[in-house]
Amino acid sequence: MTRTRSPRSRSKRPSGGLRPWLGWAIKLSLVGLVVLAGFAVYLDAIVQEKFSGKRWTIPAKVYARPLELFVGQKLSKNDFLTELDALGYRRESVANGPGAAAVNGNTVDLNTRGFQFYEGAEQAQPVRIRFSGDYVAELSSTNGSKLPVVRLEPLLIGGIYPKNLEDRILINIDQVPPFLLDTLVTVEDRDFYHHFGVSPKSIARAMWVNTSAGQMRQGGSTLTQQLVKNFYLTNERSLTRKLTEAMMALLLELHYDKREILEAYLNEVFVGQDGQRAVHGFGLASQFFFSQPLAELKLHQVALLVGMVKGPSAYNPRRYPERALMRRNLVLDLLEQQGVATPEQVAAAKKMPLGVTTRGSLADSSFPGFLDLVKRQLREDYRDEDLTEEGLRIFTSFDPILQMKSEAAVGETFKRLAGRKGSDEVEAAMVVTNPETGEVQALIGSRAPGYAGFNRALDAVRPIGSLIKPAVYLTALERPSQYTLTSWLSDEPLSIKGADGQIWKPQNYDRRSHGTIFLYQSMMNSYNLGTVRLGQEVGVPNVLKTLARLGVERQFPAFPSMLLGAGALSPMEVATMYQTLANGGFNTPMRGIRSVLTAEGQPLKRYPFQIQQRFDPGSIFLIQNAMQHVMREGTGRSVYNVLPKNLTLAGKTGTSNDSRDSWFAGFSQDLLAVVWLGRDDNGKTPFTGATGALQVWTSFMSKAGPLPLDMPQPDNIVQAWIDPHTGQGSDASCPGAVQMPYIRGSEPPAGASCGGQAPATGDAVMDWVKGWLN
Amino acid sequence: MNKWWIAAVSALALLNGCASVPQGSIPVVDSGVPVSNNERISAQRTAGSYPQAAVPRAAQARTITEDSGVVVMVPGGAASVSTPISTQPFTPGPITPGPAAAPISTGSYTPSNTYSAPAPITPSGIPSNSSGGGLAADEQLDGPVLALLTTAQQQQSSGDLNGASSSLERAQRVAPREPQVLYRLAQVRMAQGDAAQAEQFARRGLTFANGRPDLQASLWGLIAQAREKQGDAAGAALARQKAKVSL
């Protein structure tokens, strides 16, 4: 510090007779040199230590499920293209190079990018896929050979960051696209390959420009100095800092070659802010702005990114598209002027739009609800530092297409029901799973998409109302000698004296009683009186045991009011419960994560599929049948106003007291969805389970196009013809006879044949059978 | 945990180095292609390039490769007899529901004619059905499932049980109700020492194996083994009984 100023100023006026002064000056400068050398050694240690070690901490990256392609897969072309867009595939007339896709009618040619998965590497390859209806009809290599199964690379859906964190995707200098290095050097530091860390020429030019303009226009910083400033130093503007910076730049150049320095620069540079997250490095910038891997970027995109280095917020292409475009074209002009790109290349690049992903598209959406689930599951196995620093890759079961459909279903249904008074204050939560694998595919924690606050799907614990009823009826149906679907059940009023002496008089929703009915009818119409009577017969503790076997871990007191769903669960817990019903009585712990890899692609941990049989498949078959009645002719029947009649579904509505909670839980063969609507302050809503949650559910299912429920009939089930009025055994030839499933031995004795008479029509049960067959 | 995987990975890497791939035998190719986000990866684990029986296992199935296609070997219930699953022309389309429950929205797609699979291969010299492990001709598998089971088989033969498990779960997602996938999952869980889950997967397989007596027998056989491992001798005897009845 001292050396540069004092000795020079003094040595400028040396005059005779001042020898002692000179001596002092020499001594002083010697001391200065020693101090400086010490400082340099100190700086050198800093420079080397930070640069040679692990340069950056990288937050864990969370990926969606990879889209699997195989012949016979249910996948519409539109959904496929949505996914391709989100993955940043370029649409070209002929797919050329990784990340390109060409659409011709029902055929899509694409070049996949390849990816490292837990099970091994998926290679990059050219693929031709032909759609027929909503199915994949053909999958081949573009040379014509058939491919059995292909995986696309998974969509990056987020990361795990502490607050105010730098995020980056590390890149290798060998992976950069053409033009990037030249553009960067041309725009930021033309002498980069020739200077030693500082460029006196640039400083002189900057000074000249600044003095003649009378203000700070141009900086004389080299790329090395910029790197040093960002990497080692604070943002303070002082001469001391400037000098430290220069010294460190020299030291850095002394130890490392230009490519290493350039690579570090590429990864360090700040290019934008995403809420709390600072976007660093061109690798992440490429994903953040274009949803594409850096290596695939074209000249116009490279020019935009490099242009943004000068002022990431001023030239933010999403916020200031015009300014960003001007800057990009200025950079392109410079490239032409310096001979980096040909005039033709520059002219073509200038014609291109900015090309940043649009807001609201899949690529530019965030899914805080699901990420919250992932984080909670990860925190059971990892420390926070592991998650925020080690660059782990988390592979999840998240299905972005189903998520977008869930969000659309919630949004559209609220819009449609906006006329109902008080619907504005109603919040929503939704959980979508695959009942056959126990994987969570989509999750909505709030009515507003992308809202990162209170996660209602996990944390809104609310009375489940009639969603409890399958547990009540299943408890009964597990005793085939006592109960069948056509057992008679009284729906007459009853009163129950509680332990505290209080009398409880449950009521039906319509405040009427419905006489004596079949067990399945009480279930499908969600009659409270019949349900409470049945629950009392089998015993409340036994119903709670059934609930626990279904997968509900929460403990409840054995009050009779539990039979009508006074117990509170979160939507996720309800999904676990219905999962067991949907999956043939096999319980599966809900999973959102499949596996974890290290930053280098090494397998670290797997979250294996686990199942446990909790119920006899026969009794599950019966309860599923009753839940199908709910949809065909019970409280869920409005679903078939929208969905096709031949789509077999099972489900149950739930409404808590005074319509404070509107629930629906139901499933097809391959999709299970639980919807909750209610207010955060637990106030009354204008919705029942059927008029609120079921509407969202229906809308979702109509978008998702599920496979019809088709549980294989277990060995111990027989189908018997019965008289729909008496429940007595009948015969296929008898008018109005219907088939019902029974556990073998519990079916009514077969009735006599009625001869060749054609079955008559006219009653309700007959109608649903017909509807089913049509 | 860390030590464990380091050992496993280095063992794999070693095996990898020694491996040579019989031509045409393996549908998965080693590739060190960068991931889409350009993070550096090292594709050390390649599903596929393992020699057959690289890790000798007495009672484990082997992969038999022929130039014309792949035959997955499923060991029998007694764990000593291997029997083939043949590849036969299959019916694509939603795998689980039958034709009656096929696509809801579209009637235009007729899957049966769109895909021609390799002709059935009947390997010679393999005992087809001796002690209750045989799979009858109705055991057909389609393209993706067969490919994934083959991969899993190779991973298992090379001792990569986690990889095999992961590939089988992938197959289960593709064909959730294919009892052969569940059977293989049960086998791998057994090899991993998780007899309880092995039994559960075999039981799940049984619920989808109606009308497939040979497969039922194999599943019951596996349940018997699993129960034995869990110290349930009576249950194992019962399962053995069932295995016989199924045939």
Image (spheres, coloured by chain):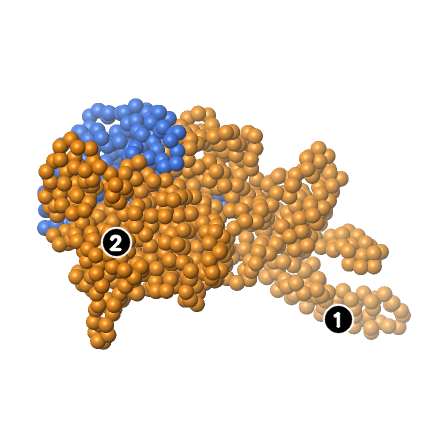
Chain colours: A orange, B blue
In the image, is A296 to the left or to the right of B148? right
Q: Which residue is mark 1?
A: A28
Figure check: B85 above or below A580:
above
Q: Residue B214 appears at what percent x and percent y?
A: 17, 35
Seen from the viewer's position, the closer of residues A246 and A177 is: A177
Q: How many marks?
A: 2
Seen from the viewer's position, the closer of residues B115 and B133 is: B115
Residue shown at the point (19%, 38%) measured from the top left: A735
Q: Are marks 2 and 1 on the same chain?
A: yes
How would you rate the neighbour count of disc 2 (Cα within 10 Å): few for under 14, some for 14-19, many for 20 or more? many
Q: Residue B197 appears at what percent x and percent y?
A: 24, 50
Seen from the viewer's position, the closer of residues A233 and B188 is: B188
Of the image marks 2 and 1, the number of the one nearer the N terminus: 1
How would you rate the neighbour count of disc 1 (Cα within 10 Å): few for under 14, some for 14-19, many for 20 or more? some
Q: Nearer the viewer, mark 2 or mark 1?
A: 2
Q: Which residue is mark 2?
A: A523
Q: Residue A478 appears at what percent x and percent y?
A: 17, 53
The image quadrant where one finds the N terminus of chain A is bottom right
Check disc 1 and report its element: helix, strand or loop: helix
Residue shown at the point (85%, 56%) measured from the top left: A212
Chain letter of mark 2 equals A
Which three-letter amino acid code belongs to the residue tagged 1? Leu
Chain letter of mark 1 equals A
The image quadrant where one finds the C terminus of chain A is top left
